[in-house]
Image (cartoon, grey):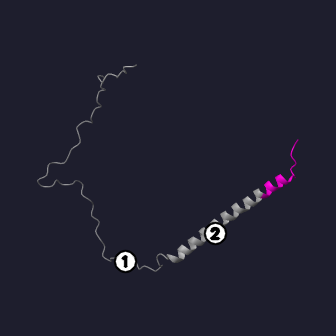
Amino acid sequence: MTPEPNSPRYRARDTAVRRTRAIVIGVAAGAVALSGAGSALAARAFKGHTTSSVTAAPTDPTPRAAVPGPQTVPPIAGEPAPLQPPAEPPAAAAPDTSGPSPQVSGGS
C-alpha cells in the first residue's frame, strides 16, 4: 500500500520544512543586516585619519655630484687580511662504507 502524497502527515511535514527554510533565510538576512549595521557604527565611532593636503618638502636647488662606490674595500689597520677563496673548490667526501652494523632483535 503506497502512502498518499496529500495525506495530513505529508502536508504537515511540508509545512514544517517551508517554515524552517523561512526561519533560516530570515536569520541569515538578519545576520547580514546586523553585520552591516555594526560595521557602519564602527566606521562612525572610529573616524581614522583626517584628509589634509601635505606640502611637499622643498627641493634643494644645488646640484649634487654623483660619486661612484669604491672598487675594493681597503683593509682596516691592525686587522688580519680578509678571507680569500680557495684555489680549487672542495671535493666531495668519499662515502663511508664501514658504518655501524645493523641491529638484530633478539626475538622471542
Q: Is residue 108 left or right of residue 46?
A: left
Can you say which quadrant of the picture contains the C terminus? top left
52 in relation to 77, above or below:
below
Residue at 81 percent across and 56 percent down: it is 12
Q: Earlier in the sequence, mark 2 or mark 1?
A: 2
Asked if the magenta segment contains residue 3, the reply would be yes
Q: Is residue 28 left or right of residue 11?
A: left
Asked if the magenta segment contains residue 86, the reply would be no
Mark 1 Cα-neighbour bin, 10 Å: few <14, some 14–19, many ≥20: few
Q: Nearer the viewer, mark 2 or mark 1?
A: 2
Can you say which quadrant of the picture contains the N terminus? top right
Residue at 36 percent across and 20 percent down: it is 106
**Label 1 sits on residue:** 57
Residues drawn in magenta: 1-15
Which is nearer the eye, 37 or 92?
37
**Label 2 sits on residue:** 33
Which is nearer the eye, 22 or 64?
22
- Name the secondary structure under disc 2: helix
Count of all numbered marks drawn on residues in the image: 2
Mark 2 residue type: Ala
Residue at 40 percent across and 77 percent down: it is 56
Q: Position of residue 48 (x, y in %)?
A: 48, 75
- Name the secondary structure under disc 1: loop
Mark 2 Cα-neighbour bin, 10 Å: few <14, some 14–19, many ≥20: few
Mark 1 residue type: Ala
Which is nearer the eye, 26 or 85?
26
